[in-house]
Amino acid sequence: MRALVTADTVGGVWTYTRELVSGLSRRGVDVTLVSFGNIPDPTQREWIDALSTVDYRATAFKLEWMQDAEGDLKMSSEFLLDVIAETKPDILHFSQYCYGSLKTDVPKVVVAHSDVWSWWVGVHGKQPGESSWIQSYRSVVLKGLQDATSVVAPSRWMLGAVREHYANLPPGVVIYNGRNPGLFNPHVSKDDLVLGVGRVWDKAKQVSLLAECSHKVPVWIVGSERHPDPAFENSSNEHQKRNVRWCGQQSEAQLRLLFSRASIYAATSRYEPFGLAPLEAALSRCAIIANNIPTFRELWGESAMYFRTNDGEDLARKIEQLQRDRELRLTYANLAYRRAKQRFTAERMVNEYVNLYQTLVPAGAAVA
């Protein structure tokens, strides 16, 4: 089987793509990978260089949610059609909505990682106001979804969100994201440390909740403070409370070390299709304290402790409760670890994608 996979290098989609493409390659799928957004730096593309069978095409075309992206979307669509004609894939796997509307007979899987419309509703509690940018964006997303052969979402909540905001969609399926447990260390002694991970400028991640109160235990916040689209202003750290440390962006290796050291992970997102940081924390045997929103309930069930929705003071109380009660903290850490290993591995994710591909492509292209 030949697959063309698209990705962007800005956020968690790149990590998701690493797990997907690596797994497909191990199963004998010939992959052409095309990335958009920033050209990846050498550390970002190390995993690709280790996969000799992957045909990688890096581009710097703007992403569909960026301001003034129309010209780039047209050029990148033409570029993809040329790559499709050259490589003759059996399946197209898009991590952007816009390419679902490409004029091709090859089956198209469009993955709804997130979208601006549901992000806006999740963050602001209402639909975005009228603007030429948001209307153009919504039109592009709607067309891409409607023309897809199959729509995939990483959670039931996200699939419901795209069905609510974009009508008349093709068949949809939930395939939960996954990570390779072997990348994380759940077996070292933990420090008295609370970790939060998320883009500081992204109100959906609302890592600033951790800085609304002082804490008796060190709290470290990791994440980029620079918005990837220069058209948007960057956020600033408005809160400086005792024991809160802003760590900026960290490399993957640095972040894995922090996960291994932290005893508690705070999942603060108010809008969450299914980001990977809480999963990485769980695979590192951190106890998870999560915002009480539907996605976290769906993903973590009773294996996480929940704080009152979007309430920084209640989050601080829950952190103190777990910090005081070592046995309770260990219980939640073990529950999260077991659930992650059972439900959210990269192997399971890739298997489900391969099964989906095989229902969409001719039998002769099936994976051996």
Image (cartoon, rainbow, N blue to C red):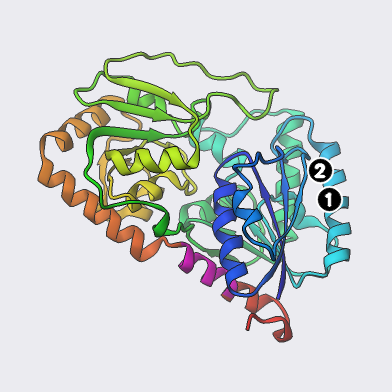
Residue ID at (74%, 30%): 67
Does the magenta stretch mainly form a helix, a strand or a loop?
A: helix
Q: Does 160 appear above or below 257?
A: below
- Amino acid type, mark 1: Ser
Counting labels gives 2
Residue 252 appears left or right of 316:
right
The N terminus, quarter of image: bottom right
- Amino acid type, mark 2: Leu
Which residue occupies the foreground of this view, 342 or 309? 342
Mark 2, Cα crowd under 10 Å, few <14 / some 14-19 / many 20+, is some
Residue 30 appears left or right of 11:
right
Q: Which residue is mark 1?
A: 77
Q: Does 236 appear above or below 192?
A: above
Cβ atoms under marks 1 and 2 closer than 8 Å: yes
Q: Label 1, label 2: how many angstroms apart (C-alpha)? A: 6 Å
Q: Give the extent of the magenta segment.
A: 346-354
Q: Which residue is mark 2?
A: 73
Q: Does 50 appear above or below 366?
A: above
Image coordinates of residue 200 in percent, x first then y, are 49, 26
Which residue occupies the foreground of this view, 257 or 246? 257
